[in-house]
Amino acid sequence: MSISVLVLTKNEERNLPGCLESVAWSDDVVVFDSLSTDETVEVARRHGARVAQRAFDNWAAHQNWGLKHLEFKHPWVFYIDADERVTPELERALRAAVANPGECVAFRVRRRDFYLGTWLKHVQTSPFYLRLFRPERMRYERLVNPVSIVDGPVGRVNGYLDHYPFSKGIGQWLERHNSYSTFEARQIIEQRAEFSIRKALFARDFHERRYHQKELFYRAPWRPLLKFLFLYLVKRGFLDGRAGLSYASLQAFYEYMIVLKVRELGAPKP
């Protein structure tokens, strides 16, 4: 059974060729573009991908719109970002999964993040992501770093999805996460009334529990420091060498940007 591929883009002319080459095994690649101003659309079409465009509003709304309105040739969809690459082992595992999915309507894949030429094997918060799914059984929540909500059983496939978040340099990473932190701050303000510590600890559904655990984490004091200690010591990021130290520090800085923006949004207006 074949698989459709969904690629989300915004000004990805540099990363997109490698991404599309890694999914050339699919006969249905859809590039869902957020009105790029570079050569992203031209690159996609040169590689034989179909292109759909929509103005970006927030991550969950954008992804949910795509799953609802885009037409896919096949019942299974694999979602990938432009700075990610499907390894040959993962390709074989994806094909095997959809050929015999059992009761599963979605599958998690393991992602390898790279920085300074190093696989961040230990310092990643979580390496598993829901990327292969039946689109009618998937939806997303949260303005940024969305939580995947699946209507049905979930499995796991072998192989790796390789991710190069610093492919455009540290400056672009900081610029992107500055934008992400604004969405995160808005999310925290909006979700304060909905948060449930009971659900964060005891909800039976994994995704509901994770959703409220995120909100619990955002209420923790000294969160940037806690994030650094968790990634560098608890997750043993120090085993990733200089890259692990740098990555843990960047993630702590990202959390501090969120803290400052929450304070700013919640401060009395002059």
Image (cartoon, grey):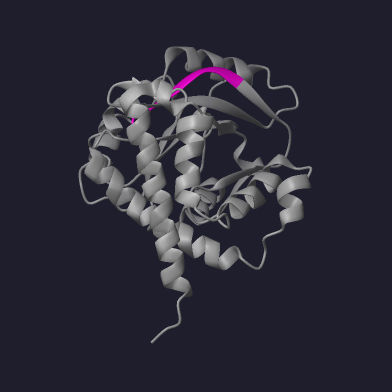
Farthest-out residue, bottom = 270
The overriding secondary structure of the stretch rendered in magenta is strand
Quarter of the rendering containing residue 181: bottom left
Is residue 90 among the parts visible in the rendering? yes
Position of residue 119 in the picture relative to residue 170 (left or right): right
Image spot of residue 126 (x, y percent): 53, 32
Above or below, comparing residue 3 to residue 52 in the picture: above
Image spot of residue 59 (x, y percent): 47, 52
For this rendering, which residue is in front, 102 or 206?
206
Is residue 83 among the parts visible in the rendering? no
Q: Which residues are magenta?
A: 157-164
Position of residue 119 in the picture relative to residue 111 (left or right): left
For this rendering, which residue is in front, 200 or 252?
252
Indicate yes or no whether the magenta region holds residue 60: no
Q: Residue at x 48, y 43 (%)?
A: 227
Quarter of the rendering containing residue 171: top left
Q: Quick one: quadrant of the C terminus?
A: bottom left
Above or below, comparing residue 265 to residue 145 in the picture: below
Q: Residue at x 45, y 77 (%)?
A: 267
